[in-house]
Each structure stands twice: as C-alpha cells, then as structure tokens.
Image: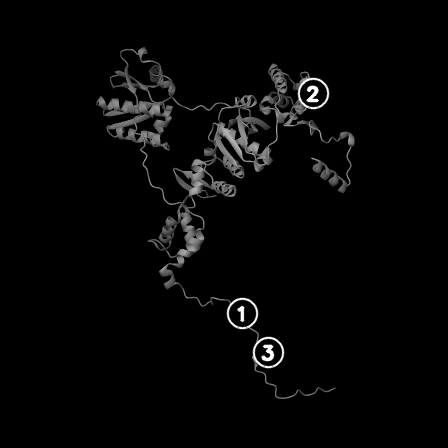
Amino acid sequence: MLRDIEETIETLRSINMKLNPAKCSFGMEEGKFLGVVVIGNGFKANPDKVQAVSRMPSPLSLKEVQTLNGRFIALNRFRANHAAKSYPFVSTLKNCLKKAYFKWTAEVEQAFQEVNKCLMELPTLTAPYEGEPLTLYLSASDIAVGAVLLMDRKNVQTPIYYVSRTLSDPETRYSMLEKLVLALFYAARRLRRYFQGHPINVLTGYKLKNVLSKPELSGRLEKWGIELGEHAIEYKHRPTIKGQVLAEFVNEVPQHKEKESSSSEGSGAGLRLVNPEEHEFTYAIKVDFKSTNDEVEYEAFLAGLRIAKQLGVKHLETRVDSMLIAGQINGIYEAKNDVMASYLSQAKNLICQFSSFNIIHIKRSENKLADALSKLASTNLEHFAKDIRVEVLDHPSIQQNQVLVIQTGTESWMTPIIAYLSSGILPTEKAEARKIKQKALNYQLNDGVLYRRSFLGPLLRCVDAEDANYLIREIHEGICGLHAGPRMTVAKLMNAGYYWPGMHLDVVQEIRKCDSCQRYAPNTLRPKNEFFPVTSAWPFQKWAVDIMGPFPEAPG
C-alpha cells in the first residue's frame, strides 16, 4: 500500500496538483469513498444517504417526489429490482407533468413505506478478483427487468452489483424469454467491465441459449445475440438459492408455465355424433397420458373418425372448435412439429376411408355440449350418466419416433462448432474456446445438421472436405457443368446452398486437376514471367554508331 501511495504522490507532483489534507485519509481500514463506505471485505451503502431517505416524510408536491427519486438513484446499486419498486414514483411523475395534477395515492404511499423497510436491510457488496468466474441471475416482470451479479466463494454467494430498468410500452408486450434476454443485454452494457474481464455464468430456468441460436430469430434477438457473443457467457440451469438476499431477488421472477392439458386426474374431450334423423350419440374421451391441448384435440378428432368408421358411416361432416386442426386438414396451416405431422398423417389416412368428408371450424360458444363432456371426463368417471359412452386412452394414437444408431464420420472443421452448439462443449484452451464462440454466432444447428447464416440469402449447409470435393467436381465437370472458372464455380456452389471455409482455394486446386481444362484451355501468348530491362555495356552499340575519327574543332 505504501508503494501505491508513493506512486500516487509522485504522479501528483509531476502534474503540479495539490491535495487538501483535511479531505485525505491514508491507511484506514474503513472509511467513506466515492459515496460508499469501504470496509475490509467489501463496501456498503452510505448511512447518511439511507437516513436522508428514511427520515423524509411523504412527498406533498411534485418537487419533493423529484427529490425522492434523486435520492433513490444514489442507492440503486444496493437495491434489487429497484426499477420495479420505484415504478409508482416514476408513474406519479409521468402523470403529473404540471403541479396542478399532482396526486399522491394510497398505492404510492404503501410502496414508499415498503421501500423504507428495504433500506434498513441493504446488502454489503464486494469486488471480485482478477479473472474470477461470476454468476448472473435475471429477473423480469410486467413493468421492469433486472439482474444481479454475484460471486461464489466458499459456497457463499455475495452480490457485486444490482441493475434494473423499467420497460417501455412496446417492451411490456415482449414474451418472457425476450424480457430475460433484454435483461441480460442491459446488464452486459451496464457491467461491461465485469463481462470483459470475467467469465459469466447465467443461471436461469429458461433456455436462453437455444433461443439466441435459432435461425428464425426476430431482428432484436439477433442483434442482442451478436453483441452478447463477444463475452464469455455460459448458460446453466438455475439451482437452489443459497442466500436470503438472492432468494428475495429470484422470487420476483415469474415461474415458467408449460401449456399442458394434463392434470392430476387426466385430460378429457367430448364427442357428439348426430345422424340425419337427429339421433345423437355422446362420447367422452379421457386421456391418461401426458399431452398438450393440441394433442388432446387431435386424439378426440381421431377417436371420432374411428367411431364413425365402426358405425359404418360413409359421408361425414365434422365440426371442430380447434382452428389448428381445421386449418391443417384443409391445407391452410402447415404441420411443422413432428408430433402434429404424425397426427395429421394418421387423420388423412382415416379420412380417405370415407366416401365424402368435410370439416368446418366453429366457435367455442357453439360447442358448449362437447366442452361440458370434456370437463366431466377430466374429473371423475362416476359423474357420467348411463347413456354417455366413455373411452379411456392410455397411450397416444401415433407411434413414437424410433431412434436409430448411426456411425458418425471422422472429425472435420465442423466438429468443435457442433459440439458447442449442441452440448456447450468447448476446448480447454481459452484462446481456442473464444474463437469457437465467435465462429458459432454465424452458424445454426438444425436437426443435427450445421448451417451457415448468410446476410441476404438462405441458410447454407456446411459440408466436410470429402463432400466438398464431390460438389466441386459435380458443379465444374458434371452433367450440367460448364468447366467454368473458380469464381463462377464458387458462386454456383453457394447458390446451390453449400458452404465450407476456404472454398475458393479448394476450387482452384481442384480445377487445376481437370484434364479437359488443361487440354482445351485457350493458349495465351502472354509470357509466364515478367520482362526486366537489361542495360547494355556499350551504350552507342544500340544505334550502330561508328566514330571514324576525331571531331572537328568548332570555330570561335
């Protein structure tokens, strides 16, 4: 410490700067510095600033609210989710642009009292060591997003910095995943010095890594993903919370809710079969396996087709309240999911067995009887009347996809990128791991196949060296080959949807091996090497000048 003080004093002398001795303190274990109280194991909030807020009465004017917000800003670093807690005061300022419209409501007063209680228990922050791994927790709500940066020493999590910001009106309509990515993006900008000097472990219950690596990202997610790619960020599943301060922070994150139809007693669906004579047959379908709402709707639809087939129906008209099923059967919607595609294929196979078939989408209000049957089926079978037929499905109507074991090829340039995108595996060397992270931003893994992202074109499929040689020969001298030059051959390869690094050099080397190009290439008269002028030792020999004798003397 003495060396540091000596170096500081010498620097001040060199620039002719003087210090006020009344405001200087050296060798102190605890003291006020830059608005905070520095202690041995970290720093905490200035008690004078905390008392200035706690002793302040409830504001009675717009000027006092502005003063209160200004005092809160000095303590934001120590407050978890301070943007959400200060939102009532900020909204009061927004709604009271003029003094005549000022209104201090009971809701704002309650929030003010809760904030005063939190100020009495502000945590002690600490500073990390050089290169120490840090952990980041994210928070998102309807009005604000936040994050807390902390470190884990001896199984004790200690906070380093709290950041938070309110959401604008368009941002409030983001999905929960987009809000969490926005919180991470905002934390990376605010805490840039920590993100650049330390590896960051983001602990969350959401799969942010999969969202940022999808090719169908929106513009803002892709922009955020590119900027976050420069940092050493790893996404991990959130474990149990160890500290009380962190537990209060994470409890404000809404829990992720899967849209599943299965309950503790199973799912249900209802069917009504009506013949031309207005005779009605009611059926209740109970699903005893885990399924989503769309899968239950398809199970009820397939069960109705099977029952109609067993009754010998030739002409069938189906009315469903699921727009997804009606759109996919009529060809309006596309079944992108493998499960939905399997259901759609099986439904079309059953529809082909009828002489005529028609499906109509109706409103849910017009299908109240079938909905009532589905609710009864999901509760208990004992509530049914005797004239209602019950069918229990204990397994899906579609077959599960079989997984076949295939042999993987040799390692190529794609192997480390695929390993990182699929499993998050990185090389042990830090420099090589950073290169892989930077490269992975330009690639996308879809169904086990690696694709290269392009700026204005579609995704380009990545190939290894063996496939690259075959593609070059096929484009250059195949059935439709023109024996074009390297530049046109590379352009055709990319237009065909393929990519690998070093395409131009590989094409040049492969074209040099082409026998037809070597035999029938145009014979150029241009010399292979450049000409260099050679000076002559006898300068007058160039013009054939012969001196016969001495020059005559000039007159004068």
N-terminal of the pair, mark 3 or mark 1, is: 1
Q: Residue at (35%, 52%) from the top-left corner?
A: 474
Up-down relation of residue 231 to residue 476 (above or below): above
User: Tag 2, which secondary structure?
Assistant: helix
Q: Residue furthest front?
A: 2
Give the CA distance from mark 1 to mark 2. Answer: 86 Å
Q: Amino acid at mark 3?
A: Pro
How far from the left and from the top, in percent, is residue 52? Answer: 69, 20
Foreground: 451 or 28? Answer: 28
How far from the left and from the top, in percent, is residue 163? Answer: 59, 28
The answer to whether mark 1 and mark 2 are in CB contact below 8 A is no
Neighbourhood count class around disc 3 (C-alpha, 10 Å): few under 14, some 14–19, many 20 upward: few
Q: Quadrant of the C terminus?
A: bottom right
Residue position for label 1: 532
User: Tag 1, which secondary structure?
Assistant: loop
Residue 292 visible to an observer of this rendering: yes
Q: Is residue 178 left or right of residue 516?
A: right
Q: Residue at (29%, 25%) from the top-left corner?
A: 302
- In this view, the mark in front (3 or 2): 2
Q: Is residue 411 left or right of residue 168?
A: left
Residue position for label 2: 52
Residue position for label 3: 539
Give the CA distance from mark 3 to mark 2. Answer: 98 Å
Q: Residue at (55%, 71%) from the top-left corner?
A: 533
Foreground: 384 or 417? Answer: 417
N-terminal of the pair, mark 1 or mark 2, is: 2
How far from the left and from the top, in percent, is residue 92? Answer: 62, 21
Up-down relation of residue 418 to residue 67 (above or below): below
User: Tag 3, which secondary structure?
Assistant: helix
